[in-house]
Image (cartoon, rainbow, N blue to C red):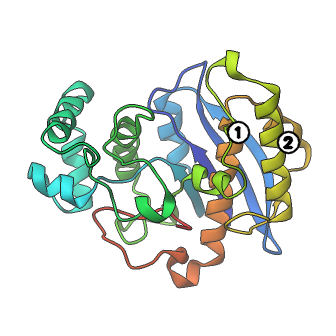
Amino acid sequence: MILHGVDFTSAPSKRKGITIATGVMQNDVFVLQSLQYLHDFPSFEAWLRRPGPWLAGFDLPFSFPRELVEYLGWPVQWAELISHLREIPRPELRLIFKAFCDERPVGNKFAHRATDIPAGSSPSMKWVNPPVAYMLHAGAPRLLDAGVTIPGMLAGDDRIALEAYPGMLARSITRASYKSDDKAKHTAERVQRRLEIVAALEAGQYVLGVPLVCGSFRDLLIADGSGDLLDAVLCGLSAGWGWMRRDEGFGLPEFDSLEGWIVGA
């Protein structure tokens, strides 16, 4: 099985693209085979439609919390929800979510999915720091249009999409910052953190335990101050972990088919 890890951005450009790590499992080890950037959405849409079989871990939330969806009166079936979402412009989406938060008490402004707790992920309705709601807005409709399979949520073909979260894996190795989109913050300390993360991944000494062979790509993973390449690899490892558990539902527990679940959480 071809495995991919996708570090997604809601605004791909020449400066910051959608980053994809591709590999295979060999004797329960993830062997990294390629790294690539896609700099616009047409390229990403074409990539999604490449023939299967393949399995990919995507670093973007696949859905919103049920609490939020029901409060807003939006569709409670995933495909219908995402079809509805695509009709809402991003500025309007922000206003809708801000109004929701404004009515709630301090300390409980955002609604959370059940998977956010074990994964330690940001609420998928958050529009700043990080703007994961915009990632969902840009990414989930494209997954729906591509006709992929999202286990427990969408029946498609032999192209399988799992929600992944690289931060969960990285934090099992170090809590220190290892990346920044600000080049002024590409420090020696962050280089050292990425080196520690890569070494732990190679040894399988992290939460998922799938060892990594990165070969000639090792120096690139460590040198990339944005962390995009490393995050794509972390998503690829999540895909590999899920593939090893394909006969047990890709390792996913019973979950709300509207909200979705992060693989490995």
Residue at 68 percent of width and 59 percent of height: 237
- Within 10 Å of disc 2 (Cα), the crowding (few <14, some 14-19, many 20+) is some
- Within 10 Å of disc 1 (Cα), the crowding (few <14, some 14-19, many 20+) is many
Give 110 or 211, whichever is nearer the viewer: 110
Residue 214 seen in the current view: yes
Q: Quadrant of residue 93?
A: top left
Q: List the single residue furthest toward the right.
A: 216
Which residue is under mark 1? 229
Circles 1, 2 touching at the beta carbon (< 8 Å): yes
Give 150 or 158, whichever is nearer the viewer: 150
**Residue 216, horizontal then vertical, whole percent:** 91, 43
Q: For mark 1, give the secondary structure.
A: helix
Residue at 41 percent of width and 63 percent of height: 115
Left or right, 15 with respect to 119, comes to: right
Which residue is under mark 2? 217
Give the amino acid type for the residue marked by disc 2 in the picture: Phe
**Residue 62, horizontal then vertical, whole percent:** 38, 53
Residue at 80 percent of width and 65 percent of height: 204
Residue at 79 percent of width and 53 percent of height: 32
